[in-house]
Amino acid sequence: MNNQAAGFRRTALHSLIERIVNATKVVDIHTHLYDPHLGPMLLWGIDELLVYHYLVAEGFRHVNVPPATFWAMSKTEQAELVWHHLFQEHSPISESCRGVLTVLHRLGLDAKERDLHSLREWFEQWPVAGYVTRCMETAGVQTIFMTNSPFDDVERPFWEAGFERDERFVAALRIDPLLTDWPNSALRLVQWGYNVGEGLSPSTLGEVRRFLADWTRRIEAKYLMVSLPPNFAYPGRHDAAQLIEGAVLPFCRDHGLPFALMLGVKRAVNPALQLAGDGVGHSDLTALQNLCAANPQNKFLVTVLARENQHELCVLARKFGNLHPFGCWWFTNIPHLIDDITRMRLELLGISFTAQHSDARVLDQIIYKWDHTRRVLTQVLEEKYWDLLCAGWEPTAAEIERDVNNLLGGSFLEFCAR
Ligand code: FIX
Ligand code: ZN
């Protein structure tokens, strides 16, 4: 191929991949969004976008008020403060700030007027049901996995009372308190009618399995999930390891459910910042290796927060077919690292992982999280398919569609169904 022919071919390849990546509907496998029937739990709109903890963390680098004063303000005042410091006093270049602008832009709003008041007015006209559809369509998302916690006192009563489900929202059973604060969780389980003691005896572990079964059934959970600190070790004598071994894994095995692990979060590094005060640490992934090796009948969905753990996760996934890496979590969900991590995964794992999850806490965020990821994915895939062309392999459009579909949820669904 001469240079000119190669140039045309590459441009055509780029357009094809861009069209496919933009048209593929996403299964968003981890968010903090909720079925609209859970009322106040589903957050949306400009003020919620502005007080997202990613922006609050950045805002505190400029805002000259103590955290306690900030938290005492109304949401409207907090949003105004963030808007002022991150959008008016400085250019909104960070990924989180850019995200707000992408949302507004894709919704057809004009943020460059810098008029927060008129932006608010636009959002106020929307009924929630119509807005959910608008956001999902704009983002190209077909299914949203929620994070559902029986330990959440606002959420639990909705499930206990029962409600008509919106089929686009699928449940995942979140069990952080159970594993990371067993003494207090044991008290709660007792209140809810489970016969558990503080020690993790066989009968207590049996009751924990009954608790997991009841909640899985109630919410129709498709997987169980926990986030763990960098120093998590497995196996071990500590509560989390014992509960995982004696309750979570046997339960997941018996019901064919994956166990999702989010590894490497250091909670409350700066507690005054509340949700914005969590940090990251380098995990010892020997724990994950041991989990996968000792439990071949279990399926593990895994994302790691530290950049330094990404390569090791890929290598582990090459060794264990029961390990499915997913998403660029939180501090790694920035274009620079999405690019790096996605390339690394493609080069080491082919198409057998899930490229991204949004982790959206505010509905509208699915628009920017998927917009930004699609841009990076298009670029990375173009290079990868070009390399195949150079090696004499011509991927068809149908094959590229199949692959993109797998990267954006298809592989995950297959892994779950296995
Ligand atoms: O543990 C998690 O699911 C994290 O995603 C959250 O705790 C975190 O606050 C977040 O929103 C990250 O994107
Ligand atoms: Zn999350």
Image (cartoon, rainbow, N blue to C red):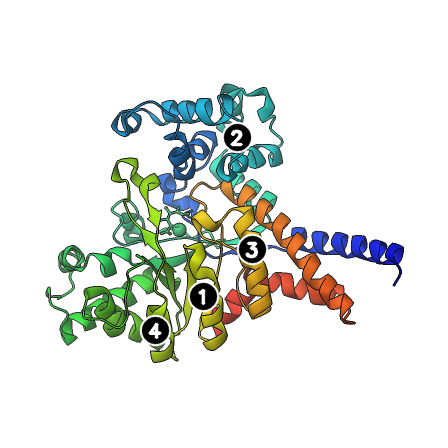
Q: Give the residue pinned by disc 1.
A: 313
What residue is shown at x 77% (from left), y 67% (from top)? 390
> Residue 132: horizontal and vertical position, in percent?
51, 42
Which of the 4 image quarters holds residue 70? top left
Q: Give the residue pinned by disc 4.
A: 291
What residue is shown at x 34% (from left), y 75% (from top)? 290
Disc 3 Cβ-to-ligand 1 distance below 8 Å = no
> Residue 156: horizontal and vertical position, in percent?
28, 50
Identify the mark at residue 32; answer none if there is no mark. Answer: none
* Distance between the alpha carbons at the discs numbered 2 and 3: 23 Å
Drawn side of residue 73 relative to residue 258, left or right: left
* Distance between the alpha carbons at the discs numbered 1 and 4: 13 Å
Q: Is residue 132 visible?
A: yes
> Residue 38: horizontal and vertical position, in percent?
37, 45
Q: Give the residue pinned by disc 2.
A: 92
306 or 250, which is in the foreground? 306
